[in-house]
Each structure stands twice: as C-alpha cells, then as structure tokens.
Amino acid sequence: MNREDFLMYKNNPNLIYLDNGATTFKPKCVIDAILEYYTKYTANSHRGDYDISLKVDELYEDTREVVRKFINAKSSKEIIFTKGTTDSLNIIVFSFMRYYLQKDDEVLITKAEHASNVLPWFELEKEIGIKVKFIPLNENHEVTLDNIKKVVTPRTKVISLAYVTNVIGDIRPIKEISNYAHQNNILVCIDGAQSVPHMKTDVIDDDIDFLAFSGHKMLGPTGIGVLYAKLKYLELFKPLLYGGGMNSRFESTKEIEYKELPLRLEAGTSNIEGVLGLRSAILYLEKIGITKIHEYEQELRAYLIKGLKEIPNITVYNEFSKSGIVVFNINDIFAEDTSRFLNHYHICVRAGNHCTKMVKEEIGVKNTCRVSLYLYNTKEELDKLIEVLKDNKKIFDVIL
Amino acid sequence: MDNNFKRELIIDNCRNPFHKKSMNEDDFIKANTHNESCIDNIDLYVKLKDGIIEDAYFDGEACAITTSATSIMLKNIIGKTPEEARTLMNEYYKMLNEENYDSSKLGEFNVYQDISKQPNRKKCAILPFQTLEKTFKIYESENK
Ligand SMILES: Cc1ncc(COP(=O)(O)O)c(C=O)c1O
C-alpha cells in the first residue's frame, strides 16, 4: 500500500524492509512537516506573541487533539508528549507508581514483556519493596484472564502488559483484563509500542488507565512518544523535571505555582519537530484507515506463514498470533547467521532476543529471526523472502 | 587458503566443535561473552594450574564465526601459558586489523584472513579471546 509515499524506496529500490517492529519508514508528508517547521515557522512553543510562534503553538496543541482522537481519550489534557515508549513507561513508574504503591504491593507482568516494561518495575521493587510477579503464559505463550486470576492476590495493585508483544506478537485481551482488574481495584498499564501503530486503539472502550507508545514505530520521527493517563491519575503525577514551561509563578520566597496539565509534565523546550512530525504521521494513518492497515497486515501474515510452512527445515514459533509479527528460525542455524544471509539479498529482518530476555524461558529458544510487517510491505517482497529461505542450504556459501 | 577450504574448516568447527560442553566444576574459571555481545552467548571454562592452561571448554549459542573461532582457539591454547595465548592473540589481532602478521603462527586461524573486510563480523572473531582474557584476569586476581 502507498509505497510511492516512502522516499526510502526511491533511494533503495531493492530494499525489502521487514523490521517495522524496530522502527518504520516515514512518508513524505512527515518529512515535509518537519522541513516546514524549520523553513517556514521556526519558533519556540508556548512563548511568543508573534505570528510564527502562535502558528507553532496552534499546531503543537492541535497535535494533542489529533492524538486524543486517535486513541479516543476523553480529554486532550490526558496526552503528554515524551521521548517514546520507554520514557513514558518510566514516567508512569517513577512519577506515579512510586508514590501510589507501597511495600509488598504486587505488580503483574509477563516474561514476554519488553525490557522497558520490566526494568522500571524491577528498580521500583529494589527501591520501595513492591513485588513484581509473572503471569504464567499458556501453551501458545499468550496471556489469558484465567491465568491472571490464578496469580492475583488482595495485594495486586497493577497489571502492566504490552497490548501486542514484540516477539510473540499476540494481541492480549485487554478489555477483558481491565474489566476484571477494575472490579478488583487493580490499575491497568499498557505498553502500546507494537499495537497503537497497527490497530485501532480505544482507551475508553478498553478502559485503559495508562498507555505508552512511540512515534517512530508509526511512521513518525524518532524521539517523540506519548504518555496517556486518565486525568484523575495524571493529576497525581509528580513531575520528574522542573524548570521552564511547567511553572506559572515562583518567587524568591520559594513560593511556587506549577501549570495545569498537560504542560506541568512537559518541562523545557519540547521536541517540536517531533510533535509536528507525529501529527502528520497520525493524520496519514487515519487517512488510510488503521483498521484497513490491520487487515492488510493479517493478509500478508497469512501469506507468509503459508510460504514458510512449505519449507521443511523452518520452525515458526507464533503461527497463531494475530499481529503482523512472525518469528522463525532455520533449524540448527543461529538466528544472526540467518539475518546475515537475508541481508545479502537486501532483506532486513531482526535477529536476537528482541529486548525480551526472559522470553527464552517461555518459548525455549533464546534467539529468533523476526519479520514485522507494515502497510508498505507487499506479497512480492514476501515471495522473495520465501524464495531465498527455500534455498537456505547455501547459507554458509553466502555468509562465510 | 582457498575460499572453499576456509568455509569447510569454519563449518567443520561449527558442526564438530572442539571441547564443547559445560564444565561447572570448581577448578574451572567461567566467563561469558554477554558484556561484549547481547546475542552471542558463550560460556568459556578454563582450568589454570601453576601458570598453565591445563584444560578448557566452551558451551552456548553463537553465530558461525564466534562458534568456530572459539573451537579453534581452544585447540590452540591448551598446555600453554596465558602469556603464550596472548602472543597468539596478538598475532591474530594483527591479521584482523590488516597489519603485518606471521601467518605461519596462526594455523587454522588463517580462515579468518578476510574478516577485516566485514567490520561487524570482526567482533565475532575476537569474542573468544576477549572472553579468555576475562578468565585470565580472574586467575591473576586470585593468584597475586
Ligand atoms: C513492546 C515494546 N515496548 C517498548 C519498546 C521501546 O520503545 P522505544 O525504544 O521507542 O522507547 C519497544 C520497541 O522496541 C517494544 O517493541
């Protein structure tokens, strides 16, 4: 779909990019939005009284509204711009959970979470003595409500999960989980890094308390992301950064007054080019339709799985997941050797543990090759991938 | 060395690696690759006694270059002193860095003679010696 909008293909006509879980290409409109900011109305935001600064303000605050609509939040005050998913999750943990949780309170995650949804919790465990526990996964490595019920105790206060995991690619039943969680006074924190770019997000319908996602995985620039939290919780966030832009008044007598949300949580000059680029990326995705993108990825995925299954010495680890992620190995070949083999044919896939170092305890293999699809991928590209993989006998002739 | 011969030697060291097994015994010093590489994961087990490498093994999962280079390294260091192993390593590094080197000293290591052209694979080729060095450091700190 829409390949002509992506200059990367113009400059690299033979490239087959299948690592969209890591980051994505940018359509021309996103690059233009950034260029326009630097060539037509460079100014700081929330400062000036002159036209170009007001223009920046208008676009910056309109982006909040664009994001609000995109994830169906109630109020644009609930949208905070951050550096990305990692930044957002850290802010949730250290600006809110650190004060909300008490010693021996329990937080549930899984062994399939990305490092960014694990390490902040582990640190908080060290710092204030919460307990991080793991929800057991079923035989397809998926989270089920039944398994959650098995580990919930009266001390469980938070369930923190990726909506879609970046290795197994399963879509978690978040609506069902949050419904159960809220009946038991448990907060629901969602890592949306791999879901928001690929499927409809509705924080109201799913009743999500906290959501984190990154712009660069959804056609936007790097260095920009979003933190969403329900207003009643966001009000309680204690800023991690203090300085310009977030205060309304301070005196030498140490009387201080901070701004209202959302600006209170956005100290310092923001990543304005990032915000404007993200705005353009979301408008672009909406124009195509996120549901249409999701369906197209499903179609590509089914096509790829069918092709891979015809190759006798390939193991697919997540045949039944519903996202655009496929993980596999050539039997008895180290994943990184496979990715180097594919690289020889200009095919980009990711080899490794994908920042989810605990998942090996779940799927029994440490390293895999991951294909992650997006709207601009085509069946022709997958044909090429399958053709090369079919001929995998010559891997060592190619890489050695 | 001709390319086919090199390739066969590398593959042979991957498929039939020398001394590939875990040695979780007290007289073996253990070190892992994971500080240098987040994907190659090799444990090296080295038994040093009276200043000699008496025995050595490795285990784990790694790419073809790392696995074969570890196998070749182990074939060449048992019975030697750490100093002798370092001398070998220095000669090997000279080859990898495209400096003048003495190929007669390198034996099977000559299979990596063209690796310098692929910088991202060079780090795989030096991983075994980097890990070996860790075991020497542990030995030296324990035997000061
Ligand atoms: C599931 C998941 N969570 C978090 C992240 C971290 O995202 P970022 O590096 O943009 O902060 C990623 C990206 O790799 C991811 O896939």
Image: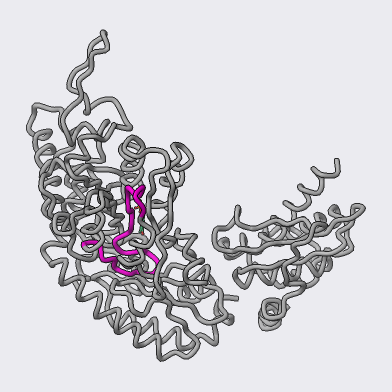
Choose between B56 and A17: the one closer to the eye.
Answer: B56
The residue located at (36%, 87%) in the rendering is: A307
Q: Could you tell whether A42 is left or right of A325 in the image?
A: left
Examine the image and state in which quarter residue A378 appears. bottom left
Choose between A353 and A149: the one closer to the eye.
Answer: A149
Residue occupying the far right of the picture:
B50
Ligand 1, image quadrant it occupies: bottom left
The residue located at (72%, 51%) in the rendering is: B134
User: Residue A82, relative to residue B127: is it above or below?
Assistant: above
Q: Is residue A158 magenta?
A: yes
Can the viewer see residue A219? no
User: Residue A366, relative to residue B86: is it above or below?
Assistant: below
Examine the image and state in which quarter residue A108 appears. bottom left
User: Residue A151, relative to residue A308: is it above or below?
Assistant: above
Choose between B137 and B120: the one closer to the eye.
Answer: B137
- Percent coordinates x, y for residue B116 in the rendering: 63, 63
Choose between A250 and A105: the one closer to the eye.
Answer: A105
Residues drawn in magenta: A153-175
Q: Quadrant of the C terminus of chain A?
A: bottom right
Q: Quadrant of the N terminus of chain A?
A: bottom left
